[in-house]
Image (cartoon, rainbow, N blue to C red):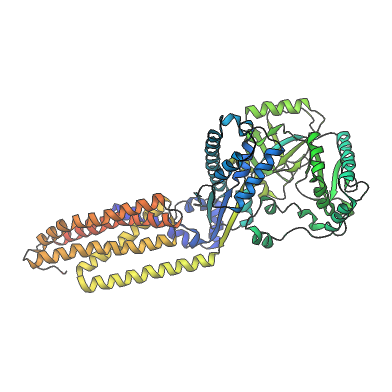
Amino acid sequence: MVLLGWSFYSLWPSIKYQNLDAEEKELLREQGNLAQIESRIIRQGLDLKGGMYILLETDIPTLVKSLASNRNEKFDNLIEEITNEFKLNRGENFFNIFREKIANSDIKVVRYYHEYGSNLEDIIAAIEDETEDSINRVLEILQNRIDQFGVSEPTIQKQGKYRILVELAGIQDSERARALLQSTALLEFYLVKNIASTNEIISQLDNILKKSVSEEELEILISESKLDKKPTKDSNQSENNVTTVDEIFGETTDSNSDNLGGESDLSLDSPLQSLIEFVQGDLVVKSKNVYALKKLLSEETAKLKLKSSSGQFVFGNDSESLGASGEYFRLYYLETVPELTGGVVEKAKANLGSLGGGSAGLPVVSLDMNSEGSKTWSRVTGANIGQRIAIVLDNKVHMAPNIREKIPGGRTQIEGFADINEAKDIAIILRAGALPAPVNIIEERTVGPSLGADSIARGQKSILIGLGVVFIFMLIYYRAAGAIANFALIWNIVLILAVLASLGATLTLPGIAGLILTVGMCIDSNVIIFERIREELRKGKTPKSAIEAGYNRAITTIIDANLTTVIASLVLYQFGTGPIKGFATVLFWGILISMFTAVYVTRTIFYTITKKSIKTLSI
């Protein structure tokens, strides 16, 4: 009775949750009780509840490149060559290509990876270990992000060497989930160069570009900038099946030309100065000029000049409407080395700006730094009072405030978010930590809730039909003993579901298949026992002694048969992935419970019946 009571106690939240309508769920959510109920229900897998299936691939070439302590153009070119060959041969091990290309080049790998060893093999082994550790950290960080995002029972696991499988059951906002998974969340604090340095570099770049870029090339660029360069989501995915972080945030290399509205203002005499304007002391660029400006800054001569000047141009996070002139993006000329990075962030919280400040009522993310970060932040702000510092997240400037005074406490805040959801997601990412390597989405599928509901209906129908056929057979063939077996079978199913609810396991379509298989295994045990009892009755034994002998003779056979299935289920669970694990979980607990119900429960009922002396047994 205690076990039966526990079963219904475990299943009650699932039964209650299934009977709640949308209004009742919303009321419980407001009261803070819905999460408590959801934590105790039988969770449904992606194939039952609907949601997102995402296959991510870690950008190993970028990670290996970032591990190099010294880099130059020759090294970067070789890594690019290795990357291109790796992309063409996805099945090949990246480090085999890396080893071959390094061995066939005149590059001394020790120069770039001296801290990892003194010869090629030692260095490659060390980098492989570092890569594996980074992928494990990516797994952990993604798990932390999704846990805070609020997805119940996500599936996050490695698939192969470089890929990560993510299943988010019941997810509604797919775009938000993609951004959360892919964003590297690289937070950096850069000093903004003064206006004199900015004007000087623009003038120098203009002189260089006029000499290095021909008039024909500039005219082609002007004609290109008239076009809408922003690729559609479908065309991009059909080309390479990879969705980048920039696309998720609404910006690709050429995305800003989406608001062109006409011909670029590019001039042949002053290429950069014709595209850049000054508004309230800031550089701004019209949306229609962004594409042309990025193309000019990507010229090799321009990149070399910026590198020698220890500066970089970075765009603002979003466009702004400045009067009747249209949409503009702010442009900042920053130092190339950050003063501080996001690794020092200890706490990050999204909220609305307090009254009395410039961000009153707007979404902001408040940051608290660790002791090391607080010391550096105090030193940087104290030494640069009056200057501006840019807060850069994923290579986009969110804000660039003036440093009015020294900030000793290590506290600051980030502004410039579209809404509170974006601020919350950035706070989640900063708390969980930045990804040690970029990840790309290489496959994505969405399962609709209607398909999941249809799967549940079909699964329920198959279980009911199977149970009905088994019940009728057992009643016809074994009569009263069949009724006892049917009772044990129902209790068997109730106990399995109760265990799944208690463990917080996820029920999938393969899990339902495991449940149906367990029904057959449970009845199989009862059939073996009942046939043994029949044999004993035919020998002339009394019902009580026949039951005793039947169970004693059948128990060894039942244990042997079920033990092999239990071992198989454990192997499936250990080495299987996704749905296979769901099947193995249900099968494992189903076999153990079926042995209990088929042997202990039915035996107890038979012993209760035969306490009184009976002459015949309905079997």
Q: Do we see residue 9 in this rendering?
A: no
Query: Residue 499, how many percent across, how many down?
Result: 37, 53
Going by the picture, which residue comes out furthest to the right? 269
Say which of 346 and 286 sits in front: 286
Question: In this rendering, is residue 469 above or below 222?
Answer: below
Query: Residue 264, how many percent across, how many down?
Result: 87, 55
- Would residue 220 appear left or right of 499 to someone viewing this image? right
Question: In this rendering, is residue 316 above or below 403?
Answer: below
Query: Residue 214, how many percent across, how many down?
Result: 88, 49
Question: In this rendering, is residue 65 above or below 218?
Answer: above
- The quarter holding residue 404 reads top right
Q: Residue at x 50, y 61 (%)?
A: 49
Query: Residue 388, how many percent across, how many down?
Result: 80, 34
Q: Residue at x 34, y 70 (%)?
A: 466
Q: Residue at x 73, y 38 (%)?
A: 391
Going by the picture, which residue comes out furthest to the left? 540
Q: Do we see residue 95 in this rendering?
A: yes
Say which of 501 and 21 sits in front: 501
